[in-house]
Image: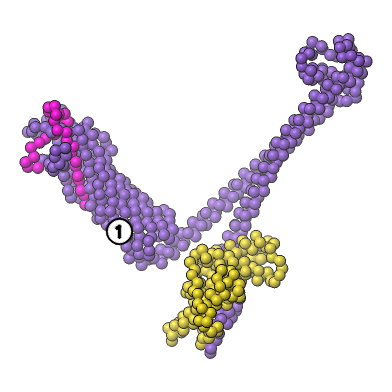
Amino acid sequence: MSKDIDKLFKDKFKESKTTAPTEAWPVIQAKLKMRRINRLIYTFSVLGFLGLISFMLFSTQTEKTLSKPLQKNTSLKNEVILKGKGVNDVNDVNDVNDVNVNKDKLPVSKPQEDSKKLYATITTEKESKNNMPLEKTSFFKEKFKDTVIEKQVKRIDSLVNSLDHLVDHLKDDLKKEKKKLIKKKDSIDVVNFNKEKRRRWNVIPVFGISNSGRLSDNVTTLGTTRAVTYPDKYFDDNKSSGLIASTYGFNVVFRATNRISIQTGIFSKELRFLTEGLFLSEFIPDVNPTNIIYNPGVEVRFSNTPDMVGSESVSLSQSIVYMEMPFELKYRMFGSSKFNTNLIGGFSFLYLNKNEIRAKSNLLSREIGKASNVLTTSTSLNIGLDIEYHLSKRLVLNSAVMYKKHYNTYKDYNNEYSPYNVGMHVGIGYKF
Amino acid sequence: MSAQAKLYSLFADTLYKVCLKYSRTPEDAQDTLQDSFMVIFKDIKKFKHKGSFEGWAKRVTVNVALQKFRKKSSIRFDDLEESKIPEEKVFIDIEEKDISLNFLLSLIHKLPPQYQLIFNLYVLDEYSHKEISEILDISIGTSKSNLSRARQLLKKEINTMKKLQL
């Protein structure tokens, strides 16, 4: 039966019933609550601010109104009191004995203070003569001022309390909301992970650079040679430092769960060290005082002091290249569908591939031998941070910063002297 | 029960249906529904009692959904000359009982975003081409041509599904 497509859709939508998800209303309620709280905070802030302003205005106003009439009144009262006693001339004030005034306390240069002191000393007279209870009015004014201030303070206290309460409430609500969002995010991640189950593997060819060092200062390329017969030939004090070297290889990552991946691979990794401040020596001892196995035909040796004035200064560059096989776990800390940040932890097996020492001076750069104290197999403990950016469904840009502490590197030294390695590598991985 | 809760219980299902049309997933639809109710509660004083409340609430929901839709999808409307716009009605042979709402929703979601929008607005939410042109800032001709393409695509899709079932 032929039917208009518009009508088909319209009718079906009209007659079909859908039910809104039950989780929607609690979320709306929470949002409404937040909105109310925000409004309250805003209102209270405005009220508090206005209250503070009005309090400040009122207090300055009160000070003015309380201080001005006091000065005026007292001077007036003096006049009234003096007039009341039948004294027309102010100079005759000394003759007024029945008024309880101590004239010694009235310095001539300060009329306002005079009046204040007068006001303070005249008590019964003022009340009886003028029928004006000045002390009482002042007392009431002071009382009034105190109560107004107290009220303002109380109001501000209550505002602060209610704001504190609201902030606590808001914090609780935000925490709950955050938990819900994290749960929701996790569930979305799980859904995405399930969708992407077919693309669990990721192969990443990587290239990087690293710098090496040793945690102990007194290990040089030559190494301390404590068991040799020439104790004055120690190289402990010579300056030794790591050099930047390259790393390349590939990583294979298997995404085991939504958050955890297992990572392995094969790398060629080089450690480079430089020992400086050496001098060529013509003296060839019977016993080798260093950890160098010299190549045949190399007829120079090194010392840390020049044999004669003008001896050639040399540095030794040591290169140790390992084939590295890491076994690491990656934990996804946070991220989105495009971007992930992972914490990496694990260890590596290292197999010695190249062991070379070169002598470098202004005149020569020559491979002279190899280190005798480097073990063929060793291990390292790895930690790092990895960042993934999904370029497409299949391609991932990967970058990691790694710290690796080596163990069992040397024959003669304990692990304290083993090198560490800090490096960064990048690569574009293919997911399948 | 608060007034807001009552309002929600009265209109949630209807508005959720509106949200479903403009959202690719039920989660997106739920988000749109929540945001729509927040706007409704906030702007309820703006309702002037011209027409039904349900109609006003639907319009609010459509506006919220459109905002979200635009954020998520890049939309490029096809421009066709008026003369090239095919005939209005598109007919299809199908038994109505064979199709479900979910099936129709899936068909709508399969449409390119520009067709999806115009088909929803014109056919399901009964906006006129003039209103659509104002809302989406396009010409009336563009609205008509995109609607026509949407219908053609839907017909094609339904026919394909029918063949697959046979």
Above or below, A383 against A130 in this view is below
Residue A239 falls left or right of residue A284:
right
As shown in the figure, which amino acid type bears the numbered disc 1? Ile
**Any part of residue B99 in sight:** no
Question: What colour do you see for chain B?
Answer: yellow
Q: Position of residue A302 (x, y in %)?
A: 13, 34
Label 1, secondary structure: give it. Answer: strand
Instruction: Find disc 1 in the rendering and name its residue.
Output: A204
Is residue A255 depicted above or below A117 in this figure?
A: below
Observer-nearest of A310 and A149: A310
Q: Residue at x 78, y 31 (%)?
A: A65
The residue segment tinted magenta is A295-323
The quarter of the displayed image where residue A199 is located:
bottom left
CA neighbours of label 1 inside 10 A, class few (<14), some (14 to 19), many (20+): many
Q: Residue furthest right?
A: A86
Is A189 part of what is drawn in magenta?
A: no
Q: Is residue A298 magenta?
A: yes
Task: Give residue B144's position: percent from left, percent from top.
Answer: 55, 77
Q: Is residue A170 visible?
A: yes
The tint of chain A in the picture is purple
Residue at the spot x=48%, y=79% of the render?
Answer: B153
**Near-viewer residue (B153 or A417):** B153
Expressed as whole percent of the image width and height from the top left, the position of residue B55 reads: 65, 71
Q: Position of residue B61 (x, y in %)?
A: 60, 67
Where is A228 relative to A333, above or below? above
Chain under numbered label 1:
A
